[in-house]
Image (tube, rainbow, N blue to C red):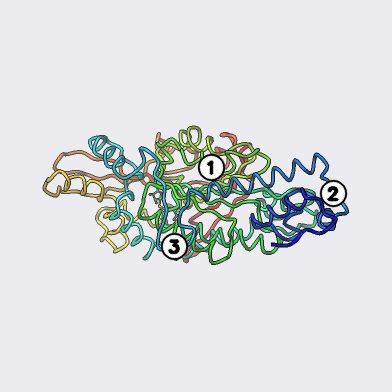
């Protein structure tokens, strides 16, 4: 341990020692923690300044509290070392596999089940992984996230002196601002490939600015334990390989549509003053277009997470001008021969019902997947959107059950609708598939 400079006050020495133990060592990091200039820190170290002014003391206390809060969150995460071969997950009461199994059993005779039930069992997760492995263009979508992250986290200035990247600006990488901590909350991350890419860009930003965020938490909420395990492992490995010891991954098996969102109780922004931290909510991979009702979801769930000024990153499916060019359109014609990718989609859709009937000791039913377009009805209420509704026809019972909504949005209609919900759309970027057709749009939205 470094010895105290003879003229340095004991209390300053104590503060600097604690900061060092918390990983805040350089003058620049200490200055950022206390919200002062680097020269101030040099004066504390040399003993020229023996006492902190009340305002600075308050800033120091706030900064230390933020670090300790992040450590508290970390304390719930046993497997700090990713090579230990342990992956820690938390399970929200009512959202674990047996609860979902029970809900599936209770609702199996309803006419709507929805995407919540597609992936929570390992076979469903496997079907999803097979789906994105072939014919899904996943590499294009991953690159789309990576490029947006680079752009939206760009700390450089435009010709008017403003920070170019809106997320970098919201984090305080702009003149006269204090850098804030960040809680990234990903709803339905699946296997987490996009979150890994975002983490890399965040850590690049810190490196470029030579300044760490006061804390960085990635909170993953997904009902699929199989996919969540992979996402938690890969994102923790990323933090560990990049030496980001202030970064924490909290992985919760949680239902973001019907569950109580208990994981919010553990993230630093819940415990700290609002001005100290930003929330960035991710809803990627058209998960927004899968929920039962977008408005209900925003009102009852998303707005419990987003506080005024917080950011929401949506990646949604785009409605093409000619709907026949949308790959899902083929599925609306039952006479078309099934491709391997389409077979995977069918297996994903049939899975929950197949497993339910097997568990009941029933013989396999005669099932059929039916995809059809719904528009201007209560399943596609955002103006300009349409819904590729995926139904399962249970022929023996002479009924159908809806397994998945998959909406495509007209971006001007979606933008206007989001603004009406109290969200300001700050950035829009379309991503084309390998055939040059716009298929996906990224929207960065601020809660007003
Ligand atoms: C299409 S997949 C993965 C999407 C991923 N974000 C991407 O961009 O590739 C959708 C994920 O959302 C999860 N999911 C669906 N409904 C959910 C719910 N109500 N609560 C939590 N997770 C849910 C599924 O388990 C699955 O991992």
Q: Is residue 338 left or right of residue 25?
A: left
Q: Is residue 404 above or below residue 430?
A: above
Residue sitting at x 51%, y 46%: 410
What residue is drawn where x is 51% and y is 49%? Answer: 75
Q: Which mark is residue 414?
A: 1
**Disc 1 beta carbon < 8 A from ligand 1?**
no
Query: For mark 2, what is the residue?
Result: 50
Q: Please state the horizontal and vertical placement of residue 324, each as a whole percent of the image.
A: 40, 55
Disc 1 secondary structure class: helix
What x and y, as percent, mark residue 417? 55, 37
Residue at 26% over, 38% down: 102
Q: Nearest to the eye among marks 3 and 2: give it.
A: 2
**Mark 3 lies within 8 Å of ligand 1 (Cβ measured):** yes
Compared across the picture, whether 424 is left or right of 382 comes to: right
- Where is residue 96? Give x, y as percent: 34, 43
Residue 129, visible in the rendered structure: yes
Q: Earlier in the sequence, mark 3 or mark 2?
A: 2
The foreground one among 346 and 339 is 346
Q: Are marks 1 and 3 in contact (CB under 8 Å)?
A: no
Which mark, by number, is residue 138? 3
Please say if 326 is above or below 52: below
Residue 163: % across, % down: 73, 54
């Amino acid at each position: 341990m470094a010895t105290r400079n003879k003229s340095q006050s004991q209390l300053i020495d104590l503060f600097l020692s604690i900061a060092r133990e918390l990983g805040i060592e350089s003058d620049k990091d200490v200055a950022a923690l206390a919200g002062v200039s680097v020269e101030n820190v040099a004066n504390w170290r040399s003993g020229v300044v023996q006492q902190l002014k009340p305002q600075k003391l308050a800033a120091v206390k706030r900064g230390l509290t933020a670090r300790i809060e992040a450590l508290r969150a970390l304390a719930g995460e046993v497997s700090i070392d990713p090579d230990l071969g342990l992956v820690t997950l938390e399970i929200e009461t009512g959202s674990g596999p047996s609860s979902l199994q029970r809900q599936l059993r209770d609702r199996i005779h309803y006419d709507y089940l929805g995407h919540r039930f597609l992936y929570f069992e390992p076979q469903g997760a496997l079907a999803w992984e097979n789906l994105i492995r072939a014919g899904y263009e996943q590499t294009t979508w991953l690159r789309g996230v990576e490029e947006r992250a680079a752009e939206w986290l760009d700390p450089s200035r435009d010709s008017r002196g403003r920070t170019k990247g809106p997320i970098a600006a919201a984090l305080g990488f702009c003149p006269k601002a204090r850098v804030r901590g960040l809680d990234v909350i990903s709803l339905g991350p699946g296997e987490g490939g996009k979150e890994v890419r975002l983490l890399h860009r965040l850590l690049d930003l810190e490196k470029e600015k030579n300044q760490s965020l006061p804390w960085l938490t990635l909170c993953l909420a997904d009902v699929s334990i199989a996919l969540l395990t992979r996402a938690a492992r890969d994102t923790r490995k990323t933090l560990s390989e990049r030496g980001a010891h202030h970064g924490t991954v909290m992985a919760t098996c949680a239902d973001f549509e019907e569950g109580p969102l208990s994981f919010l109780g553990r993230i630093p922004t819940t415990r700290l003053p609002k001005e100290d931290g930003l929330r960035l909510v991710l809803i990627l991979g058209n998960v927004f277009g899968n929920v039962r009702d977008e408005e209900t979801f925003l009102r009852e769930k998303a707005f419990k997470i987003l506080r005024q000024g917080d950011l929401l990153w949506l990646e949604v499916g785009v409605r093409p001008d000619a709907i026949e060019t949308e790959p899902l359109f083929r599925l609306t014609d039952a006479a078309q021969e099934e491709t391997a990718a389409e077979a995977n989609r069918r297996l994903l859709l049939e899975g929950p019902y197949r497993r339910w009937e097997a568990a009941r000791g029933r013989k396999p039913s005669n099932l059929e997947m039916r995809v059809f377009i719904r528009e201007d009805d209560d399943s596609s209420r955002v103006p300009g959107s349409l819904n590729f509704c995926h139904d399962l026809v249970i022929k023996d019972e002479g009924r159908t059950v809806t397994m998945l909504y998959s909406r495509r949005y007209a971006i001007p209609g979606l933008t206007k609708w989001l603004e009406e919900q109290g969200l300001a759309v700050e950035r829009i970027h379309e991503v084309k598939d390998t055939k040059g057709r716009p298929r996906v749009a990224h929207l960065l939205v601020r809660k007003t």
